[in-house]
Each structure stands twice: as C-alpha cells, then as structure tokens.
Image (tube, grey):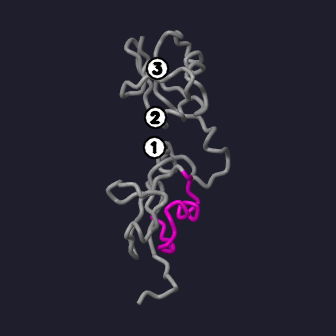
Amino acid sequence: ALADQESALRLVLVRPDAAPTPFSCLPSRTFDQLKQQLGLEPSDALATKDGTPYNDGTTLSGAKLKDGDEIFLFGKSAVDVPTAQPPPESTHRASGDRDLELLLVRDEAPPKKFSCKPSDRFEAIKSDLALPSDLHLTTSSGDVLNDASTPVQVGLNNGDEVHARP
C-alpha cells in the first residue's frame, strides 16, 4: 500500500549558466509550483534532457520523475548566457525593462547592432534607427513586424535579427 506521507523527490536543476543544483520537491507539486520554489521566472521553461518542455500544470509524479532525475532550465533565465548576465536573482531592474540587444540586417549595409526596450513599438524603433517609415521590419524567418507591436509581443530575444525590407 502507498504510504499517506508522500516522500520528497531528490532532483537536480541543470541550467546553462550555473552548476547543477540539487533540490527536493514533493511529487504532487506542479511544475508551476516548482518554478516558484526555485525562484524562477514564470516564462522559464523546465524540460527533459532532450529539450521536451514540461507542462506547467503537470505534477512531478505525472511527469514520471524519479529520485536523481535532472530537470533542465530553458527560457529567459537561461537565454542571457552569451553575455554573462547576472543570475536571475539580481534585483537591479525588472527583466521587463532591460534593453534588448538586436541586430538590424539590411541588403545595402553591414548588419548593425542596436538596443531597444522590449516595450518599444517598432515605429519608434524605426525612427530611432533613422529608417524610412515605409520600410518593413521582419523577423529572420520573414514574418512582418507590425509598427504598433513591440519586441516582447513578437517574442524577440537578445541577439535576434531584425530585417529591414522595402
């Protein structure tokens, strides 16, 4: 028979920017609750070693995790690695207003790095970059970026390319 007292799972959080962190968690907790316990951002993704994300509402037992299993962190706290950002515990500024470093790619000019706020509208970004207003900005995959939308709305991250097309 199953004991009423559930025993905590001993798991390991693996993140790209830090040593693996062992922790304990009850199997009945959801991944959402686990992120709060570990002090992670709600937008962070926890995943299997091969990158399959766990659903926030799933419990650890529902994901068939066992003692000693590793959970991998992907997402905002993991993305900033190339430019050694301080760990997510830093309280300098809310991550929402940290500048994004993007790359402007145009046919007639070399790629140019620029930074903007995640909440800046693309029409403002175009004027900051002194681009003609009839130029269209697109993602590297060719999706047109609406002038009224913002980098955070379209899911741009540090290092992403923005293409300027007539």
Rendered residue at 57%/18% (across/down): 123
How many neighbours does mark 1 have within 10 angstroms: few (below 14), some (14-19), or many (20 or more)? few
* Coordinates of residue 99 in the picture (x, y in percent): 59, 35
Q: How far apart are the two marked residues, 1 and 2, measured between alpha carbons?
A: 9 Å
- Amino acid carrying label 1: it is Pro
Disc 1: which residue: 82
Q: In front: 86, or 122? A: 122
* Coordinates of residue 101 in the picture (x, y in percent): 52, 32
Q: In front: 42, or 100? A: 42
Q: Secondary structure at mark 2?
A: loop
Report the quarter where the C terminus lies.
top left
Q: Residue furthest bottom?
A: 1
Rendered residue at 35%/55% (across/down): 52
Tell me, yes or no, whether the highlighted magenta stretch contains residue 32. Answer: yes
Disc 3: which residue: 137
Rendered residue at 53%/64% (across/down): 34
Which numbered disc, 1 or 3, marks the residue closer to the eye?
A: 3
Q: How far apart are the two marked residues, 1 and 3, measured between alpha carbons?
A: 25 Å
Give the answer, above or below, for where 31 lies relative to 90. below
Q: In front: 30, or 100? A: 30
Q: Are marks 1 and 2 in contact (CB under 8 Å)?
A: yes
How many neighbours does mark 3 have within 10 angstroms: few (below 14), some (14-19), or many (20 or more)? many
Task: First in sequence, mark 3 or 2: give its number.
Answer: 3
Tag shown at residue 159: 2
Q: Quadrant of residue 126?
A: top right
